[in-house]
Image: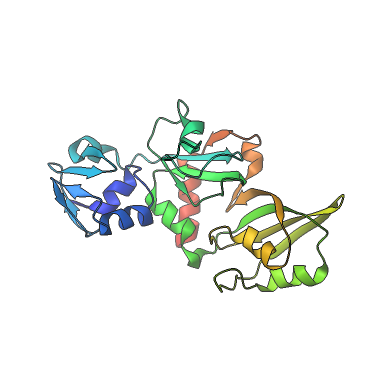
């Protein structure tokens, strides 16, 4: 037996949170009956229905521990999703014919943001990377519409209140460069609030013209330099990283 949420996560039907939400909302059936408990136990004989498709547990159960890990350079103009009901381009368009396994994305990037992302079917790793206690840093290059002053940089470093009344955790400023009449700021954060970088600069009166994630945890954009590039990571590398996070 295996928990319904865990099973669906391991076969690449989404992140733990996404699947948990679908189950609680009554969007998942087991043997034709709606199940709302993520911890519901399924066995080989069961048939699961999710996202308008049937999944036969016995066909998938032997493959759930065959984990894979890919870095991808998401270009601007693609959704951090595997499908879109409005017909927009998604990560699926980038990985079709290149990645055979069912994978999901760990975290998100905005439609108009480019940069490094991780795709996997390993829910345990995803949970470790996204859990706030591990403080996994993400580094961004941010081009804003005017020169930024030291006072505003200090506010970013100390944390600022953005839309919705949330105060961000302190950010680390790595580098500042003048680009003509603009400024390019390289900074690192360990949070993942929706549109956080853009909202941080908006709160200070700046417009973000270009945004690119260049590091995610131990992985750098240098490993997938060009938009659309994909790189498979070794299981050994991931094993060592997971061991470090759990220590």
**For residue 53, above or below residue 145:** above
Between residues 49 and 64, which one lies in front from this camera angle?
Answer: 49
Q: Identify the residue at horizontal 43%, vertical 52% (top origin).
A: 125
- In this picture, residue 110 sits left or right of residue 58: right
| Colouring method of the image | rainbow
Q: Position of residue 23 (x, y in %)?
A: 26, 55
Could you tell me how many numbered marks the image carries?
A: 0
- In this picture, residue 150 sits left or right of residue 20: right
Q: Position of residue 247 (x, y in %)?
A: 46, 63
- In this picture, residue 207 sits left or right of residue 196: right
Q: Position of residue 200 (x, y in %)?
A: 65, 64
Q: Position of residue 72 (x, y in %)?
A: 55, 39
Residue furthest out toward the top: 97
Residue furthest out toward the right: 180
Q: Quadrant of residue 202?
A: bottom right
Q: Identify the residue at horizontal 82%, vertical 66% (top origin).
A: 149
**For residue 193, above or below residue 165:** above
Residue furthest out toward the front: 86
Between residues 32 and 85, which one lies in front from this camera angle?
Answer: 85
Between residues 176 and 161, which one lies in front from this camera angle?
Answer: 161
């Amino acid at each position: 037996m295996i928990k319904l949420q865990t099973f669906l996560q391991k076969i690449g039907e989404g992140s733990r949170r996404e699947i948990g939400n679908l189950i609680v909302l009554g969007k998942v059936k087991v043997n034709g009956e709606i199940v709302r408990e993520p911890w519901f136990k399924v066995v080989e004989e069961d048939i699961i229905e999710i996202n308008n498709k049937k999944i036969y547990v016995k066909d998938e159960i032997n493959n759930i521990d065959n984990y894979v890990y890919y870095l991808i350079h998401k270009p601007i103009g693609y959704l951090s999703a595997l499908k879109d009901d409005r017909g927009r381009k998604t990560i699926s368009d980038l990985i079709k014919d290149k990645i055979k396994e069912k994978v999901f994305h760990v975290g998100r990037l905005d439609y108009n943001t480019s940069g490094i992302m991780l795709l996997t079917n390993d829910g345990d790793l995803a949970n470790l990377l996204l859990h706030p206690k591990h403080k996994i840093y993400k580094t961004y290059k941010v081009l804003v519409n005017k020169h930024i002053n030291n006072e505003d940089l200090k506010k970013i470093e100390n944390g600022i209140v953005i839309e919705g009344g949330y105060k961000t955790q302190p950010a680390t400023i790595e580098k500042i460069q003048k680009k003509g009449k603009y400024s390019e700021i390289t900074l690192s954060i360990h949070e993942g609030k929706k549109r956080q970088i853009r909202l941080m600069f908006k709160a200070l009166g700046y417009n973000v013209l270009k945004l690119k994630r260049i590091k995610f945890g131990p992985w750098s954009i240098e490993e997938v330099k060009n938009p659309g590039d994909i790189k498979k990571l070794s299981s050994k590398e991931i094993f060592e990283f997971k061991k470090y996070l759990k220590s």
